[in-house]
Image (tube, grey):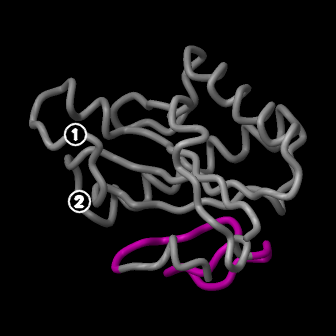
């Protein structure tokens, strides 16, 4: 498993090893170099307690798909995140559903190969904003994109 995805409480799904066991898809690229900066502006945000892609967020996923189509030899990890409300287990599951929703959009709408996109859920463990306001919570309900490039 890629070291960028290992750690306490991280659940990798749709292409990796996690609490649910082995997936039938390949794990992320072994030894791949993670790059969070390339698609940092394409972070997708979600409504409270939802994993559906909002129409306003679709252009970001379209840009991610364009990048993947124009850049061979890289893989993508979609990381799902939540705000701190809800149990740790529920948030881990919701983060996974958010990551999978973004992955499925890329696969179904744009024909990106399933072997190029994996998911990971961090639940509430990696907040983008530590505040306790609705504005802060909204920043934490997201899917982020990490490019894995060969060394």
Residue hosting label 1 = 129
Q: Residues within 10 Å of mark 1 (few under 14, many from 20)?
A: some
Decide if residue 32 is on the left or right side of residue 143: right
Q: Which mark is residue 30?
A: none
Total tally of numbered discs in the picture = 2
96 or 130: nearer the viewer: 130
136 or 53, nearer to the observer: 136
Badge 2 marks a residue whose secondary structure is: loop
- The image shows residue 61 at horizontal and vertical percentages of 67, 30
Res 31 quadrant in image: bottom right
Q: Earlier in the sequence, mark 1 or mark 2?
A: 2
Which region is colored magenta? 8-26
Q: Is residue 150 left or right of residue 88?
A: right
Q: Residue at x 86, y 45 (%)?
A: 112
Residue under the point 47% across and 78% down: 6
Residue 81 on image: x %, y %: 40, 49
Q: Could you tell me residue 139's position as x and y percent?
A: 31, 32
Disc 1 element = loop
Distance from label 1 to label 2 (Cα)?
Answer: 18 Å
**Magenta run includes residue 18:** yes
Please rate how many residues cluster around mark 2, counting C-alpha atoms within 10 Å: few if below 14, some from 14 to 19, many from 20: few
Who's the residue at 53% across and 79% down the image? 3
In this rendering, the answer to whether 21 lies above or below 113 is below
Q: Position of residue 23 (x, y in %)?
A: 71, 77
Q: Main secondary structure of the magenta part?
A: loop
Q: Which residue is mark 2?
A: 87
């Amino acid at each position: 498993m890629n070291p960028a995805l290992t750690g306490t409480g991280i659940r990798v799904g749709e292409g990796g090893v996690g609490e649910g066991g082995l997936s039938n898809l390949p794990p992320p690229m072994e030894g791949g170099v993670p790059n969070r900066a390339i698609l940092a502006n394409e972070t997708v945000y979600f409504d409270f307690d939802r994993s559906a892609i909002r129409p306003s967020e679709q252009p970001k996923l379209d840009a991610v798909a364009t990048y993947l189509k124009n850049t061979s030899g890289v893989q993508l990890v979609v990381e799902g995140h939540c705000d701190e409300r809800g149990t740790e287990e529920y948030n881990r599951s919701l983060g996974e559903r958010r990551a999978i929703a973004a992955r499925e959009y890329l696969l179904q709408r744009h024909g990106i190969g399933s072997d190029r996109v994996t998911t990971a859920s961090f639940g509430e463990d990696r907040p983008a904003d530590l505040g306790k306001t609705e504005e802060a919570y909204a920043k934490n309900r997201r899917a982020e994109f990490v490019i894995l490039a060969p060394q």
